[in-house]
Image (cartoon, grey):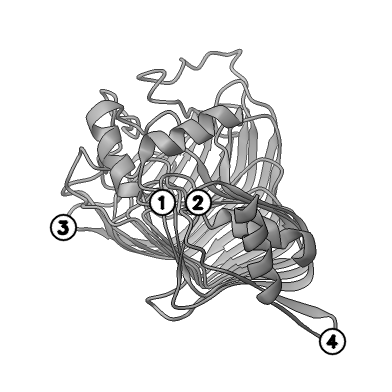
Amino acid sequence: MMRVLSLVAGLIVGTSSAAGWKTCTVPRTNLTDDSLAVNALLANCSKDATILFEAGKTYNISTPINFGNLTNVEISFQGNLTVPKNIPYIQNIVNSSGVFHLAWFTIGGTNVTLNGNTDPNWGWVEWHGDRWWLASGLTHPGGLLIRPYGWTLEFSNSVIKNMKVSNPIAWNFQTGGDNLTIHNNRVECQYPLDNPDYFPFNTDGFNLNGSNIYIHDNWVKNGDDCIVVNAGASNIVAKNNYCEGGHGNSIQLQQNGSISNVTFSGTTFVNSLYGGRFKSYQGLSGQISGITWENFKMTNVSLPLYLTQNYYDQEISSAPPAVTPSTVTTNLTNVRIANFTGTINDVNPGDNSCLSVPCWYNVVNATKTEALIFDLIQGYASDIHASDIDMSTVSGGRTIDIFCTPSELPSGTNVGYQCVKGPLVPT
């Protein structure tokens, strides 16, 4: 009890107000868990306030924080935050919560701003994920089964900016809500590209589930989707982002639902498995429409554009189910691919995320020089068009190909290039 009282007293001292706006400074306590100090602040600082993690201080966030529903609040990450290094300790918290993929930070509300520090040395959230990747490689390839999400954010009219994440355990920003701006954030996984036992599985940068989202000028190096748009999302613009070492700008449907009006534009990709990607499973229902991938600059990318309605989980199966006349899946329509430049990785294609043989991203009969791969199901894809694809191979001199089956598309469809499994030739 005395410990709690001393914390509250410290918080009262650290709270100031001006013209109705409060600044609530999170004290750096001598305890091993500064989450307690944050929780003590929330009763008085969940509206018209700044919650401040001070520069020059490192806070131990040893238990998850649920900020609840905030109104007109800025959370200012000027100091550094660190989660425990102890893997069993975190797993025990996740397991005992009864919540699958418990988020370490949960925030809801309206008019919320997450604001990091532009100083390169401060404003970091350190997850020590490298320990988890190594443990996974040694004991459970594909990622340890019990892991937390980083952030679950369900707010509207809100902003995420200048946030910096170092070595995440797995998934980073899971965002829902309406009218969001996400910019100038950094997600950094520090891992070697050539070590198959040390791979940051499932370290998605930004998972978008909301509507009217503008995400731009972010920097992501990871081992999964750089930016991924999920079921229920609509009116998304992703512009001028940097993606390294991961699985690209993705549209995915893992459950029944729809996605509409999504534009990925101006992304720079370096050493990535994918550039643009669409993935859905057989047996799902929904409508995916109004999708654009454009103005991509790629260096050493294995699969610049890959559309599949035959996705499968490599930890469950070594191949997708066979396609039959009765196979159903989501409808994919009104897709535009334009202005791709750069190099295709034909020298050492792929990454170290393989757990199955053949590898989960293997495309049977592909040449490893395709700029466009369409792996579709007849009757469920239409109005797909590509233009201005200007790619070359890293090795130099090899022909750039397309992987396309005419029978998978409506009769007479013009995808902008000859629909063949062969050279990329404009129509």
What residue is disc 1 on?
168
Q: Is residue 49 left or right of residue 55?
A: right
Q: Amino acid at mark 1?
A: Pro
Q: Nearer the viewer, residue 107 or 182?
A: 107
Which corner quadrant of the image does residue 2 belong to?
A: bottom right
Label 3, on which residue?
A: 397
Amino acid at dot 3: Gly
What residue do we see at 33% from left, 32% from top?
363
Q: Nearer the viewer, mark 4 or mark 3?
A: 4
Residue at 38% in and 31% down: 144
Report the disc number at residue 172: 2
| Residues tagged 4 and 1 counted as in contact (Cβ below 8 A) | no
- Label whose residue precedes the other's in the sequence (2 or 3): 2
Is 77 above or below relative to 306? below
Instruction: Give the crowd class for mark 2: few <14, some 14-19, many >=20 residues within 10 Å.
Output: many
Query: Could you tell me if the residues under marks 4 and 3 are in contact, i.e. CB atoms within 8 Å?
Result: no
Q: Say whether disc 4 or disc 3 marks the residue closer to the N-terminus.
A: 4
How many angstroms separate mark 4 from mark 3 (CA)?
67 Å
Above/below status of 175 relative to 131? below
Q: Can residue 236 be seen in this snapshot?
A: no
Q: Are marks 2 and 1 in contact (CB under 8 Å)?
A: yes
Label 4 neighbour load within 10 Å: few <14, some 14-19, many 20+: few
Nearest the viewer among 408 and 246 is 246
Q: Is residue 3 visible?
A: yes
Q: CA distance from mark 2 to mark 1?
A: 7 Å
Q: Earlier in the sequence, mark 3 or mark 1?
A: 1
Residue occupying the far bottom of the picture = 19
Indicate the amino acid at tag 4. Ala
User: Between residues 360 and 68, which one lies in front from this camera angle?
Assistant: 68
Image side of residue 358 versus residue 65, left or right: left
Image quadrant in which you'd find residue 20? bottom right
Mark positioned earlier in the residue sequence (4 or 1):
4
